[in-house]
Image: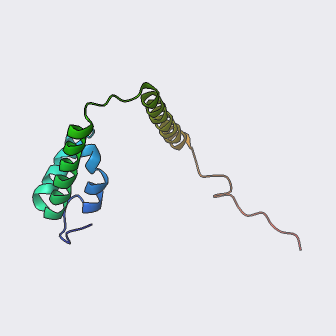
Amino acid sequence: MSCGDPHDTECGEVLDHLYEFLDNEMAEGDCAKLRVHFEECSPCLEKYGLEQAIKALIKRSCGCDDTPADLRTKVLARIDSIRAGQRSAQAAAASADGPPAGHGAPAAATAE
């Protein structure tokens, strides 16, 4: 989705992070970027308003139900697993020193 106008933050990026914004899970600097975008872009503001209304409706309708303990445990374990995988990938990328094997080395001569 795009309104066709140029923005500092693209519509696609804003919509990719809309739920993080709605759930207050973003850094303040990122939130500020989205607020500026919503002031400039009526289609994204409309999408934000719709998602905010849906979220409020769900909260009113389902807000009194307790989350089953086993579901909560499984979700938190999965989040931890994903975060651990991300940390491992970041550590691997940071520790990579030099080009992968085979890059930069002269090619072996072939016998005729």
Q: Position of residue 85 (x, y in %)?
A: 52, 38
The quadrant in which residue 46 appears is bottom left
Residue 75 visible: yes
Q: Residue at x 20, y 58 (%)?
A: 47
* Residue 88 as seen in the image, left or right of residue 21: right
* Residue 67 as seen in the image, left or right of residue 22: right
Residue 60 drawn above or below residue 12: above
Q: Position of residue 43 (x, y in %)?
A: 17, 64
The quadrant in which residue 5 appears is bottom left
Q: Nearer the viewer, residue 13 or 97?
A: 13
Way the structure is coloured: rainbow
Q: Nearer the viewer, residue 110 or 96?
A: 96
- Direction right: furthest residue: 112
Q: Nearer the viewer, residue 36 or 79?
A: 79
- Direction bottom: furthest residue: 112
Q: Residue at x 44, y 35 (%)?
A: 79
* Residue 76 as seen in the image, left or right of residue 7: right
- Quadrant housing the N terminus: bottom left
